[in-house]
């Protein structure tokens, strides 16, 4: 018997020696060519880049992995304890490897193998998970586990436990596009980590093993069971009291998506910013560097602009009648057809698809994707001009709004832009009816003919070249040769009428084509070409006289920026979408404001902002043009809706040939708004459509809501101008109150009208010699292309 025990002892001893040698050899083999773990000491993970509006609302996020990095000192103890209890209770005691856990896993693996299961169970510590996530693959093999153990032991000697835990909590994937605990807290609960309660922290700690298996949106019971297990583990480890644990277990999983009030919706704007960031720093920085981008977007104005543009598009579409149902189906299949359209059709938000399921007497019964039924509201569907009881038939798929009024998906499209004329900051940009249906940005990418909305710049060229608002031009038929083989060009007015000799002011206010052409002849077409370049409207305009009537192409953003230069008194600006950019550490790396702050460091002197931009035009000419464009609003019938706002405004409509493009660009002293509408494939909007009828209503609606809380103020007149009372119709000086206005004249024009001195109403003092800008020496050299969109 004793011999048997001796044999067994030495057999076991020898096997143990052999096993130890085998394990040692296995460790020796796998200790070669291990990946360097030095990278863990300088951990800079890819983190999300976030765009914010000017008032701090989240606009958009860009990331390959949605991660928000937090140092361990900013991660609450509650969160750390939850993960330690769930994943590695001995984390702060073991040297990177928990031998008890390995033994437990080994036993499970033996049982699994005996049952024919191939999957191996790991006894991984948090340290081992860090090694696996950062340094090794997810391969399930003995060799990989050995390497994992070796590296875990090594980094435990090199890095502090807090550093290892920091790596782990910021790297792990927790489902819902969330990498790291900070991102998961935001995506699941719309909270920062320090706002999480016990049950929420425990839920996050329940996810690392299998985020999809415990998906709370699809498998809530599984997720709840796992979360409660974590809470029990936290109680066992004395991280929480019994009372707190029981109270937390009694709570359901309460998920909270981000509050829409905290998010700014501006898809076209965000995409433009994304393109700018990519141009500045590249794709890698955008998707991995964790930039904080504060944009110029005003969410309130953006909402107003989107609504105003959509209403203008819908109103036009309604005027041109009902085009019929979206689709037709049989009454047995209408629910499937609605589901198909809802998932694969055009985005029609906030409207919805509906099926006509029955027509009886004076009632059209509708069925919806949600399996509810309602009657079509015939009263608010009268815009169709049709008897819908006869027009519609069962099986028709239509579009209705939330009052069950008939609608249709518009074919026309457009854009709206609002800018701060003093800085060039783009406050609002709506690039189309629906970003989901078309990513094409009609504010920045659509090159279209501006029509008469370009004319102000022809008149500005005239004012720069010593013509005055009272200069007389003949509004009569004009003919121009266009070259061999081409017909004679005979530009006409909109109503094919002529007014004879009228002032330059009235020529622009009434948008007279022959006068505009004659002005270009008088000053030379090259002056108009040069001014189009200088204002960034078009960087290579051809010197054809048709361009002065708006035949060349430009974008809405370019034209709105050009009007902004007039509104600010002639200072050069370019559209800006970004106020500032900070890197992942909060360091400012880009500022959109190029102005200087004078006396800002002084404790005695009053600080003020100095505009560093050069003049694009003489401020006096800019003011004269603004005064004339105020007259467009004040004196024309088509601008009655703008006058009704009771605000100081200037602006101009534009309608291209055959009304393929319609525009309105207008401004107050502090806000410039441009509107464009047209078909994406250019074609006539209709014989009676124009900028005043189609585009101007969007401008009026925008301004009415945007300026509701702002005081009205006049345009500021620069030095070097004299206000003179003249006859509005003749341009001659007058003392009469009838048909008289106050016209601004430059000093260089005084000698041409010495009689005006006698009836001058006011004289603006000349700038002092030490003032920064010499109005007679403004820079009219061609401005280089600076990337205006």
Image (cartoon, rainbow, N blue to C red):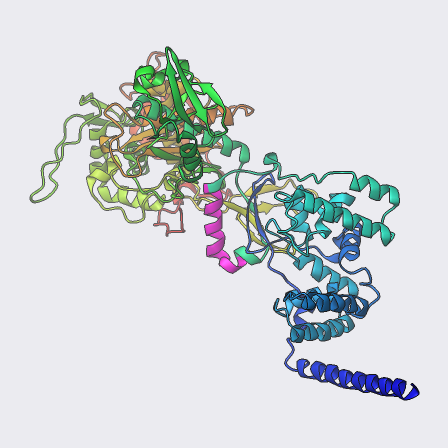
- In the rendered view, does 459 fall on the left or right side of 674? left
Pick the front one: 60 or 89: 89
- The residue shown at (52%, 38%) is 265
- Most extreme residue toward the front, as rendered? 1
- Most extreme residue toward the right, as rendered? 2
- In the rendered view, does 35 fall on the left or right side of 249? left
Query: How far across and how far down the image is residue 136, in percent?
Result: 63, 70
Pick the front one: 732 or 695: 695
Instruction: Inspect the magenta stretch and tell me whether residue 272 lies in it.
Output: yes
- The residue shown at (21%, 22%) is 495
Query: How far across and how far down the image is residue 716, in percent?
Result: 47, 30
Query: How far across and how far down the image is residue 506, in percent?
Result: 29, 24
Depicted 244 relative to depicted 68: above or below: above
Prevailing secondary structure class for the magenta stretch in the rendered image: helix
Depicted 37 relative to depicted 699: above or below: below
Give the image quarter of residue 681: top left
């Amino acid at each position: 018997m004793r011999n048997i025990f001796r044999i067994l002892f030495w057999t076991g001893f020898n096997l143990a020696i052999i096993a130890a040698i085998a394990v040692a050899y296995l460790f020796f083999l796998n200790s070669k060519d291990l990946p360097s773990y030095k990278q863990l000491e300088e951990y800079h993970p890819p983190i999300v880049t976030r765009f914010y509006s000017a008032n701090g609302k989240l606009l958009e996020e860009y990331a390959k992995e949605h991660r928000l990095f937090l140092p361990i000192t900013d991660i609450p103890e509650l969160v750390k304890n939850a993960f330690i209890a769930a994943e590695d209770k001995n984390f702060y005691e073991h040297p990177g490897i928990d031998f008890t856990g390995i033994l437990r896993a080994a036993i499970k693996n033996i049982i699994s193998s005996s049952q024919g299961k191939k999957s191996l169970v790991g006894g991984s510590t948090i340290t081992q998970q860090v090694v696996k996530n950062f340094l090794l693959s997810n391969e399930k093999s003995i060799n990989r586990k050995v390497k994992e153990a070796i590296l875990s032991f090594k980094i435990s000697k090199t890095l502090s436990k807090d550093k290892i835990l920091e790596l782990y909590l910021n790297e792990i994937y927790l489902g819902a596009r969330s990498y790291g605990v900070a991102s998961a807290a935001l995506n699941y609960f719309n909270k920062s980590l320090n706002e999480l309660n016990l049950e929420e922290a425990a839920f996050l700690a329940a996810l690392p093993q299998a985020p999809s298996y415990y998906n709370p949106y699809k498998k809530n019971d599984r997720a709840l069971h796992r979360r409660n297990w974590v809470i029990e583990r936290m109680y066992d480890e004395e991280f929480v009291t019994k009372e707190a644990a029981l109270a937390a277990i009694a709570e359901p999983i309460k998920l909270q998506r981000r509050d829409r009030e905290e998010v700014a919706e501006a898809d076209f704007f965000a995409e433009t910013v994304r393109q700018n960031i990519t141009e500045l720093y590249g794709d890698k920085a955008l998707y991995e560097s964790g930039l904080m981008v504060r944009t110029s977007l005003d969410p309130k104005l953006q909402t107003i602009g989107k609504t105003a543009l959509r209403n203008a598009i819908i109103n036009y579409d309604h005027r041109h009648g009902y085009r019929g149902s979206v689709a037709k189906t049989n009454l047995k299949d209408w629910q499937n057809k609605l589901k198909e359209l809802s998932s694969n059709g055009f985005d029609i938000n906030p409207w919805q698809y509906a099926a006509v399921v029955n027509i009886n007497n004076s009632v059209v019964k509708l069925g919806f994707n949600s399996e509810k039924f309602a009657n079509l509201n015939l009263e608010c569907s009268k815009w169709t001009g049709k008897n819908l009881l006869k027009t519609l038939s069962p099986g028709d798929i239509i579009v209705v709004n939330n009052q069950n009024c008939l609608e249709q998906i518009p074919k026309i499209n457009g854009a709206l832009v609002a800018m701060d004329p003093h800085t060039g900051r783009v406050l609002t940009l709506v690039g189309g009816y629906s970003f989901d249906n078309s990513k094409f940005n009609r504010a920045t990418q659509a090159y279209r003919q501006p029509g008469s909305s370009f004319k102000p710049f022809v008149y500005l060229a005239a004012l720069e070249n010593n013509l005055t608002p009272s200069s007389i031009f003949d509004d009569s038929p004009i003919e121009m040769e266009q070259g061999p083989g081409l017909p004679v060009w005979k530009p006409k007015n909109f109503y094919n009428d002529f007014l004879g000799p009228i002032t330059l002011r009235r020529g622009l206010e009434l948008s007279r084509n022959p006068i505009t052409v004659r002005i270009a002849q008088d000053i030379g077409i090259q002056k108009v070409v040069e001014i189009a370049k200088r204002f960034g409207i078009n960087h290579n305009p051809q010197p054809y006289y048709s361009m002065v009537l708006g035949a060349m192409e430009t974008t809405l953003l370019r034209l709105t920026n050009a009007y902004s230069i007039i509104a600010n008194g002639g200072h050069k600006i370019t559209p800006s979408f970004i106020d500032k950019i900070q890197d992942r550490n909060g360091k400012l790396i880009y500022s959109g404001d190029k102005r200087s702050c004078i006396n800002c460091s002084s404790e005695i002197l009053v600080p003020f902002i100095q505009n560093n931009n050069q003049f694009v035009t003489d401020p006096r000419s800019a003011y004269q043009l603004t005064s004339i464009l105020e007259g467009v609003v004040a004196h024309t019938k088509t601008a009655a809706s703008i006058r009704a706002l009771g605000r100081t405004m200037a602006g101009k409509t534009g309608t291209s040939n055959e009304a393929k493009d319609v525009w309105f660009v207008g401004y107050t002293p502090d806000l410039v708004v441009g509107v464009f509408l047209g078909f994406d494939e250019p074609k006539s909007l209709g014989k009676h459509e124009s900028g005043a009828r189609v585009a101007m209503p969007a401008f009026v609606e925008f301004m009415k809501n945007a300026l509701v809380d702002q005081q009205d103020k006049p345009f500021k007149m620069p030095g070097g101008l004299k206000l003179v009372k003249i006859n509005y119709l003749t341009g001659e000086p007058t003392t009469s109150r009838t048909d008289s206005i106050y016209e601004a004249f430059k000093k260089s024009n005084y000698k041409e009208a010495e009689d005006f001195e006698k009836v001058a109403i006011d004289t603006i003092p000349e700038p002092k010699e030490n003032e920064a800008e010499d109005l007679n020496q403004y820079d009219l050299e061609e401005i280089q292309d600076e990337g205006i969109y």
